[in-house]
Every structure is written in structure tokens, then in C-alpha cells.
Image (cartoon, grey):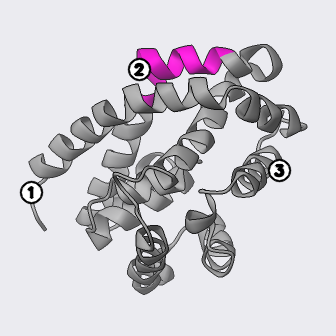
Amino acid sequence: MNYLAHAYLSFNDPGILTGNMISDYVKGKQKFDFPERIQQGMNLHRLIDEYTDHHDVTRELQKIFKSHYGLYSGPIIDVILDYFIATDNAIFNKNALMNFSLGVYESLAPFSTIFPEKFARMFPYMKSQNWLYHYQFHEGIKNSLGGLARRAKYLDETETAFQLFIIHLHELQQGYDAFFPDLKKIATEAFKSMDPV
């Protein structure tokens, strides 16, 4: 669950941000129960996920985890990408990540009455523990991978994934450097094409 990527690629638009952050908790036609701008955020979320899943670089990086985690290699890469976004000085320098994280929680809060149930239960923990900020630390990624294991039906452990993350840190960094500018370009173009509501 790459929450930082989805938050960053919401371009400071509260409705887009809300849709982008809750999209995984909204199934099928439930999307149409939400305001149009939030639906657009969900569409952007799904574009980001699809592009990430099928990019040559991320598919190559998944091979690091494939023998241990099979189809869960994609979600593991998603989590790890948030580490590299959080530590990317071209995006967040000095206190920028803290300010960005607090701004995300503040922007989401007015929409709390329409959060899907699972996201509504999780959001207070995300905010109080400042998940977005802590993705810059190895421990934050370890905790996030652990959260993935708790939510996934057939994933028993992620300690091995964390160790592989540490071992292959340089290779993963190179992959991020090659991939993320492509993702940002695609997401930016999609956002610009949306009609303002």
C-alpha cells in the first residue's frame, strides 16, 4: 500500500487526494456513491496502480521478492517505493516531508464522514503514528510490510521481504530512479486532463 505515492500524486487537491487514498477500500459500483472529484481521485489511483504493475522496471524489481512471495511481490514493491519517495531530496528536503504529511491528514479530515469503514478505522492510526513521515526510515518500511502481512490472506510473514529490501537497497534505488519520473509524468498528465468540479 503505497500511501505516500498516492498522496504525493494527488497534486494538493483535497478531493483527488481523498479518492486516491480510499480507492482500495471501494469496490465496483460503490465508486459512484461518492462525489465526482473523489471518483476522479479513485480513477487516478487505479491508473497509478496499473501503470506501476506493468512497468518494465517494477516488473524487474519484483523478481527480487518473487521466489519468496509470488504475487505479493507487487504490493511489496509498492510499499518499498514509498521509502524512496520519502528519501528523495528532489521531492522532500529538510522539513518538507513532515509538513506534507501533516497537510495530507488535515486535507483528509473533512471527508472523514464518507470514508469507507476500513479506511475510517485505519486513518486515526495513520495520523497519530504519522505513517507518511515514517516511510523515510527503515523501521517505517518494516512496520508497513508487517501491516501488509496482517491484511493479506495468504501472506504469513514479511521479515524476509525487509531483509531483501536491505540487501538490494542500491538496486531498488536505481529502479526507483528509472521508474518514478515516468509514473509522475503519467499521473500529472491524467490530473491535468480532469475537468475541475
Disc marking residue 55 = 2
Look at label 2 and name its amino acid.
His
Place of residue 7 in the rendered image (x, y in percent of width and height, measured from the top left): 41, 60
The CA span between labels 2 and 1 is: 27 Å
Look at label 1 and name its amino acid.
Asp
Determine the image quadrant of residue 129. Answer: bottom right
Q: Does 29 sit above or below residue 174?
A: below
Which mark is in front, 3 or 2?
2
Nearer the observer, 158 or 151: 158
Place of residue 11 in the rendered image (x, y in percent of width and height, measured from the top left): 26, 60
Place of residue 161 in the rendered image (x, y in percent of width and height, measured from the top left): 78, 33
Q: Earlier in the sequence, mark 2 or mark 1?
A: 2
- Please report the bounds of the magenta region as a residue range: 52-63
Q: Earlier in the sequence, mark 3 or mark 2?
A: 2
Disc marking residue 195 = 1
Look at label 3 and name its amino acid.
Arg
Magenta stretch mostly in which secondary structure?
A: helix
Nearer the observer, 75 or 101: 101
Q: Are marks 2 and 1 in contact (CB under 8 Å)?
A: no
Neighbour tally class for label 3: few under 14, some 14-19, many 20 plus, Cα within 10 Å: some
Disc marking residue 139 = none
Q: Does 98 sit above or below residue 52?
A: below
**What residue is rendered at 46% in x and 83% in y?**
109
Identify residue for label 3: 150
